[in-house]
């Protein structure tokens, strides 16, 4: 009840304001004031003789609900004439923001490798990675696409069209679960599947996402192109989630770009166990491939382009000349030092050397080196298993079948 009241009150709040009302400096800023690059312009090494500079900030700032917060959308005009939207996300819950930025940096480096390999390049396999720049511990700038919508908001929109409350399936799930537990029995996989089938038959049909796509892309050419791109993007999202042991791909963090079909994921982190510091590999579902997604990309898309793209990506990254282990060690080292710092005693300190690298005591350092080695071995083993296939039989096919069946 209180969620509905808060949502109704939020809708009455102003949707935009003028930038000069809040910050006159940004309103008056232009390229003649100072030559400043766009946020995140140098997140990857590139030619320094050309970069996009900020020409000016556009006058109107929009207030949008994205990334689980009320964010301000700034529009920055570059000196090349293009307008670049950025979200100013101010959230006290961004304690894990650095962890996400590590994963994004790794994905950017993987894109560089995917572009250099023939099979991945000809399939246009490229991870969509948004620019994220930390401004302060509680605030950051996130590259935005106004045409993007999360899977959760698409679901909520379709529920509104069907004139049903989008919270009903969750409420029904907990009602059935409490009824099972009241009888003194445990909720087995069979019980959970029965609840899912009931929700699908009465509340959320398997075709909901496909209905949204056909309503949004009414031209057959647009619909086919969107479906092809989203199939490749889902293949890559599922691939990195499984191989790199990343956190679960929930619908609220999966943003679909309606103008291109690209998918970018917010808040992807390494799924590190809080106690042992090891990557969590005991997940019943390898990656997200729900009935609504399989219905959209069809069984042919799942068995064909999606499976082939995952195998092509795996075969690209196991190429010995790419030295993927070196990239993984560098990123996982920082991840596990941060984990160690969080779990260690307050008396122990993590020092920073002259190069800005975190350093730990020799004894702890050896333990972290061992943990990094184990994590890299686990990731490499998964990568190698996905890259191998014998005719139509492959590990990817088994994982896709497991993701579809659960």
Image (tube, grey):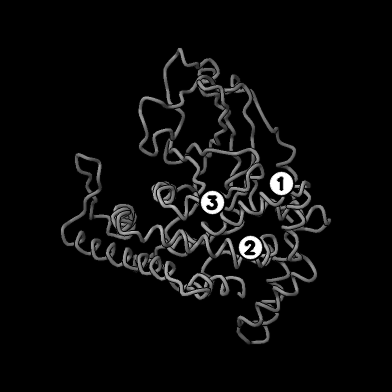
In the rendered image, which residue does mark 1 sit on?
A: 222
User: Which one is earlier in the sequence, the residue at label 1 or at label 2?
Assistant: 1
SS type, badge 3: strand
All told, the count of numbered labels is: 3
Label 3 belongs to which residue? 265
Q: Residue at x 57, y 30 (%)?
A: 74
Q: Earlier in the sequence, mark 2 or mark 3?
A: 3
- Asked whether the beta carbons under mark 2 and mark 3 sit within 8 Å of each other, the answer is no
How far across and down, in percent of the image, does residue 108 sit?
Answer: 42, 46
In the rendered image, residue 238, in percent from the top left (x then y), is placed at 52, 61
**Hey, which residue is sitting farthest right in the picture?**
163
Q: Is 376 placed above or below 69 here? A: below
Q: Residue furthest top?
A: 32
Alpha carbon of mark 1 to alpha carbon of mark 3: how far? 23 Å
Considering the image in quadrants, where does the N terminus appear?
Answer: bottom right
Specify whether residue 337 is in view.
no
Query: Depth-wise, is mark 1 or mark 3 nearer the camera?
Result: 1
Asked if residue 84 can be seen in this view, the reply is yes
Residue occupying the point 47% across, 38% down: 140
On the image, numbered disc 2 is attached to which residue? Answer: 301
Label 3: how many Cα within 10 Å (few below 14, some 14–19, many 20+): many
Of the numbered discs in the image, which one, if any, rests on residue 20?
Answer: none
Q: Residues within 10 Å of mark 1 (few under 14, many from 20)?
A: some
Q: CA distance from mark 1 to mark 2?
A: 17 Å
Q: Using the image, determine if residue 34 lies above or below residue 273.
A: above
Q: Position of residue 295 (x, y in %)?
A: 70, 64
Instruction: Choose between 394 and 98: the one closer to the eye.
Output: 394
Foreground tag (2 vs 3): 2
Q: Closer to the camera, 105 or 67?
A: 105
Q: Secondary structure at mark 1?
A: helix
The quarter in which the C terminus is drawn is bottom right
């Amino acid at each position: 009840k209180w969620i509905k009241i808060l949502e109704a009150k939020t809708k009455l709040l102003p949707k935009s304001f003028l930038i000069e009302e809040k910050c006159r400096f940004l309103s008056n800023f232009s390229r003649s004031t100072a030559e400043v690059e766009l946020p995140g312009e140098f997140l990857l090494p590139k030619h320094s003789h050309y970069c996009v500079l900020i020409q000016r900030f556009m006058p109107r700032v929009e207030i949008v609900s994205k990334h689980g917060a009320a964010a301000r959308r700034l529009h920055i005009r570059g000196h090349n004439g293009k307008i670049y939207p950025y979200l100013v996300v101010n959230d006290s819950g961004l304690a894990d923001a650095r962890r996400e930025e590590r994963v994004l940096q790794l994905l950017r480096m993987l894109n560089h490798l995917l572009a250099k390999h023939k099979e991945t390049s000809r399939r246009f396999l490229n991870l969509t990675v948004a620019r994220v720049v930390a401004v302060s511990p509680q605030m950051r700038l996130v590259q935005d696409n106004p045409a993007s919508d999360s899977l959760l908001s698409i679901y909520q929109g379709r529920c509104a069209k069907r004139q049903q409350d989008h919270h009903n399936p969750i409420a029904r799930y907990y009602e059935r679960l409490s009824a099972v537990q009241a009888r003194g029995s445990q909720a087995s996989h069979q019980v959970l599947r029965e609840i899912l089938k009931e929700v699908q038959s009465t509340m959320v049909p398997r075709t909901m996402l496909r209905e949204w796509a056909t309503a949004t892309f009414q031209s057959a050419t647009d619909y086919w192109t969107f479906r092809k791109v989203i199939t490749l993007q889902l293949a890559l999202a599922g691939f990195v989630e499984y191989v790199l042991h990343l956190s679960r791909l929930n619908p609220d963090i999966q943003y679909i770009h309606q103008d291109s079909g690209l998918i970018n994921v917010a808040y992807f982190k390494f799924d590190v166990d809080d106690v042992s510091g090891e990557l969590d590999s005991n997940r019943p579902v390898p990656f997200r491939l729900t009935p609504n997604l399989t219905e959209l990309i069809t069984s042919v898309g799942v068995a064909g382009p999606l499976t082939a793209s995952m195998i092509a990506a795996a075969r690209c990254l196991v190429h010995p000349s790419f030295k993927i282990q070196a990239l993984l060690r560098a990123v996982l080292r920082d991840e596990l030092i941060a984990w160690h710092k969080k779990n260690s005693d307050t008396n122990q300190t993590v020092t920073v050397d002259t190069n800005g690298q975190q350093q730990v005591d020799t004894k702890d350092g050896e333990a972290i080196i061992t943990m990094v080695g184990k994590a890299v071995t686990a990731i490499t083993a998964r990568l190698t298993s996905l890259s191998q296939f014998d005719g139509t039989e492959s590990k990817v096919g088994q994982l896709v079948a497991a993701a579809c069946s659960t």
